[in-house]
Image: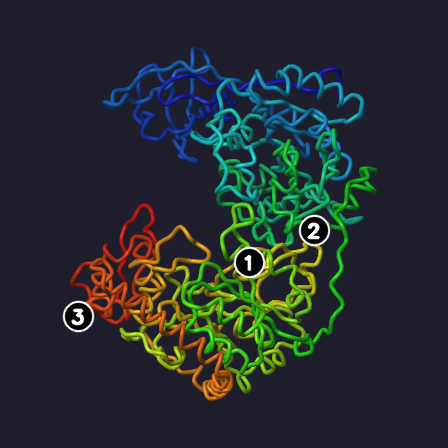
């Protein structure tokens, strides 16, 4: 290249209605003589009806108007001898003449070249030079247009400073490339959005629900001017050999020796278009005091689902009249056999944040391809993630050792013995129970059971912890308990949940034998209702309540929640309510997680899923019977007691409505009740245990009597047991999620009395959420 290595261009933006973003005069050589055509690109928002379609004296003739990404572009035939004017339509439909300043295209600059087009927000000149060098040296790029979206007063320096640094760097690196920096006098970002370089807009950033969204910033917001791709095509690339759409934080993946480049593949593609698919890359950590660089990025998310769609095209072969958009070239199908990958360096795109702020650390794993680039190509020594090991243990699920349940309780005395007896009957070895603020003898009964070697009982220490709810505080404490540390299998579950194993003889041994070498299995809830049982009875709830939700019931969202049996082999760092938490990321490929039908769970669930979906639910092997409401009288006591997790939410009518499912009957657990009854009777043969149980039952009945004496509680009870709510409890699978969010008051009072078709569906428009 000669002295001018970097050419500076600016869009021909003009104010007006609609505002003009750019205009290009294109020569049109024809046998009957040369003519000129004008391509006018209008800013968002604009529409074709704003361009006058009919001839107007003194105005260029409109040949075509096209809407693209919320904006419009017009093609005109113009008179080269005079000023260029177009006609737009005023709000009343009258034509208005506008004089247009237009540039000639720079086609010759990029003719026959392999070109890049990318956006630069405020990335450093060094980053942009690394981007150019990589694609020049390793992929054969010979030209680039960089859309510099940084405002003139950017902290990264002025636009002139950027061009000067880029020009100097190209000379030092001896890059033989045609480079244009395209600038805009107006912002091009999406209205109302903050900077794309803010962590709130980083796609994988955790904790966005706790972030304050950044203030709108039209200069730095994600690109909103979708016509920019058409602009660069007609300004620069109409005669280019090939163009790849890659931002300055994107690097094509390294190609194999002797493999064709992406540029060559574009030219060989049948329609002149190939697909580029990007994956986001992250550092494990950037060294203190050092700027972020491409070779810091040696990690990716193991569970990333969607790639970033971009494209490469040979402009003339793909057809210049086919519209260029961010993710595709319209009407030009990519060659299915030619897909090229690229890496998007997120710490360059969103600088100044740690890797843990950009993506959950539990999702990041080292990628050998990225490590090779950093060390062997860039000559860099990145900070690497630690290497972890799985705890030594038998691989077979059935040989893992003891099974332990950890749970929290408050005023659950009448229901403890059945729950323990049942789970002992199916093979649970140990119980670790945390209690707080009990008034019905729950804590004293558990102390008694601990003395007799049946359970481990602890006072819940959540009040001594910072901002902890009872259940989370108990789980944090349980991690240090030997009974958990030495367990082969663990699960966190509640006293109203029963593990219902449907295969073999109904025991955990049968389940573990079927699991082979799997180390986790999720037990999806089957919500059991009150079955129209109103009074409390001192008998097995598993025998009393047999009506439940259908297996296929996606709403409310709690209906398919699950709890998880998991091996204690250090794949995860801590206990969680629904599943273990804190996946050790480099051990993700050691997770062998099954659903309740014995099918593998997808890797997207490994970090933080807590409920089943149509793809992941399963009841064939095991389910978790969830008796969330029990009888109407017992529900009064449950509501009065409060929750162990969402302690600030009332367990009122909305909770009853969404959890009281009575559509079907399920007797699958009944075959285990004789064994559970035998174990229960064995426990009750101990006079002390029998007395403790009787005391809790008496306290429960006394609380019911106390609550029923209150007018508000009596009215609440009458509502729960009303014919309307009993009928609604058999119709819940017909309601949309908005109904559960809003609560039962949005349901017409007579809906339960109507003659409705079997497949009817009812929902509402609702903003906000009711108390649950």
The residue that label 1 is drawn on is 474
Q: Residue furthest top?
A: 82
| Distance Cα–Cα, label 2 vs label 1 | 31 Å
Which is more N-terminal, label 3 or label 2? 2
Residue located at (77% from left, 41% from top): 383
Percent x, y for residue 285? 72, 40
Mark 2 secondary-structure assignment: strand
The one nearer the camera, 212 or 93, is 212
The one nearer the camera, 20 or 692, is 692
**Residue 365: mark in rendering:** 2
Residue located at (46% from left, 88% from top): 674
Q: Nearer the viewer, mark 2 or mark 1?
A: 1
Percent x, y for residue 690? 45, 81
Label 3: few (<14), some (14–19) or many (≥20) C-alpha neighbours in 10 Å: few
Mark 1 secondary-structure assignment: helix
Percent x, y for residue 424? 55, 80
The residue that label 3 is drawn on is 755
Mark 3 secondary-structure assignment: loop
| Distance Cα–Cα, label 2 vs label 3 | 57 Å
The one nearer the camera, 684 or 541, is 684
């Amino acid at each position: 290249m000669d002295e001018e290595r970097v050419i500076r261009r600016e869009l021909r933006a003009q104010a007006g209605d609609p505002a003009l973003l750019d205009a290009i005069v294109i020569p049109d050589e024809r046998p009957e003589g040369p003519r000129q055509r004008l391509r006018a690109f209008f800013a968002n928002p604009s529409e074709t009806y704003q361009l006058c379609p009919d001839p107007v004296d003194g105005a260029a003739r409109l040949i075509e108007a096209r809407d693209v990404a919320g904006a419009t572009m017009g093609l005109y035939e113009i008179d080269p001898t005079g000023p260029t004017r177009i006609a737009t339509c005023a709000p009343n439909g009258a034509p208005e003449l506008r004089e247009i300043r237009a540039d000639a295209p720079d086609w010759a600059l990029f003719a026959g070249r392999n070109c890049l087009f990318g956006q630069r927000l405020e990335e450093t000149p060094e980053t942009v030079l690394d981007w150019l060098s990589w694609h020049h040296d390793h992929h054969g790029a010979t030209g680039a247009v960089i859309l510099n979206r940084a405002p003139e007063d950017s902290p990264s320096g002025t636009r002139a400073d950027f061009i000067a640094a880029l020009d100097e760097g190209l000379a030092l690196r001896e890059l033989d490339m045609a480079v244009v920096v395209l600038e805009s006098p107006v912002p091009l970002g999406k209205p109302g959005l903050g900077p794309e370089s803010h962590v709130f807009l980083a796609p994988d950033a955790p904790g966005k629900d706790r972030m304050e969204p950044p203030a709108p910033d039209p200069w730095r917001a994600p690109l909103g001017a979708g016509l920019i791709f058409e602009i660069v095509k007609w300004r620069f690339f109409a005669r280019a050999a090939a163009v790849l759409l890659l931002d300055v934080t994107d690097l094509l993946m390294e190609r194999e020796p002797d493999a064709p480049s992406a540029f060559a593949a574009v030219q060989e593609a049948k329609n002149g278009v190939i697909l580029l698919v990007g994956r986001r890359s992250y550092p494990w950590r950037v060294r203190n005091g050092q700027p972020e660089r491409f070779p810091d990025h040696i990690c990716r998310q193991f569970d990333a689902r969607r790639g970033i769609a971009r494209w490469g095209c040979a402009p003339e072969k793909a057809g210049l009249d086919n519209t260029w958009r961010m993710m595709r070239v319209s009407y030009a199908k990519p060659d299915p056999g030619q897909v090229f990958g690229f890496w998007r360096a997120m710490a360059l795109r969103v600088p100044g944040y740690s890797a843990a702020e950009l993506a959950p650390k539990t999702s990041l794993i080292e990628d050998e391809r990225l490590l090779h680039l950093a060390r062997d190509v860039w000559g860099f020594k990145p900070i690497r993630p630690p290497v972890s090991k799985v705890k030594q243990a038998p691989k077979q699920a059935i040989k893992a050792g003891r099974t332990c349940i950890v749970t929290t309780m408050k005023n659950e005395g009448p229901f403890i013995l059945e729950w323990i007896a049942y789970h002992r009957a199916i093979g649970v070895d140990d119980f670790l129970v945390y209690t707080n603020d009990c008034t019905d003898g729950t804590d004293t009964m558990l102390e008694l059971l601990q003395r007799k070697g049946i359970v481990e009982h602890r006072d819940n220490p959540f009040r001594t912890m910072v901002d902890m709810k009872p259940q989370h505080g108990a789980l944090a404490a349980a991690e240090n308990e030997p009974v958990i540390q030495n367990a082969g299998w663990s699960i966190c579950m509640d006293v109203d949940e029963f593990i219902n194993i449907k295969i073999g003889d109904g025991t955990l041994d049968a389940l573990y034998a079927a699991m082979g070498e799997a180390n986790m299995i999720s037990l999806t809830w089957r919500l059991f209702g009150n079955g129209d049982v109103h009074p409390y009875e001192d008998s097995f709830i598993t025998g009393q309540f047999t009506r439940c939700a259908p297996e296929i019931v996606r709403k409310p969202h709690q209906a398919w929640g699950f709890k998880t049996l998991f091996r204690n082999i250090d794949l995860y760092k801590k206990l969680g309510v629904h599943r273990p938490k804190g996946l050790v990321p480099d051990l993700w490929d050691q997770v062998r997680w099954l659903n309740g039908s014995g099918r593998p769970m997808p890797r997207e669930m490994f970090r933080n899923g807590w409920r089943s979906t149509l793809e992941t639910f399963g009841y064939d092997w095991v389910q978790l019977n969830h008796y969330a409401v029990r009888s109407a009288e017992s529900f009064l006591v449950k509501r009065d007691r409060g929750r162990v997790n969402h302690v600030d939410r009332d367990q009122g009518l909305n909770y009853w409505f969404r959890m009281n499912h009575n559509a079907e009957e399920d007797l699958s657990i009944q075959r285990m009740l004789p064994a559970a009854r035998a174990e229960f009777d064995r426990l009750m043969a101990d006079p002390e245990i029998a007395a403790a149980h009787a005391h809790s039952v008496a306290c429960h009945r006394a609380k019911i009597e106390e609550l029923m004496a209150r007018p508000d509680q009596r009215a609440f009870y009458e509502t729960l047991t009303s014919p309307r709510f009993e009928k609604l409890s058999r119709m819940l699978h017909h309601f949309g999620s908005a109904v559960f969010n809003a609560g039962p008051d949005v349901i017409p009072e007579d809906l339960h009395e109507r003659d409705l078709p079997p497949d009817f569906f009812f929902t509402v428009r609702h903003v906000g959420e009711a108390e649950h």
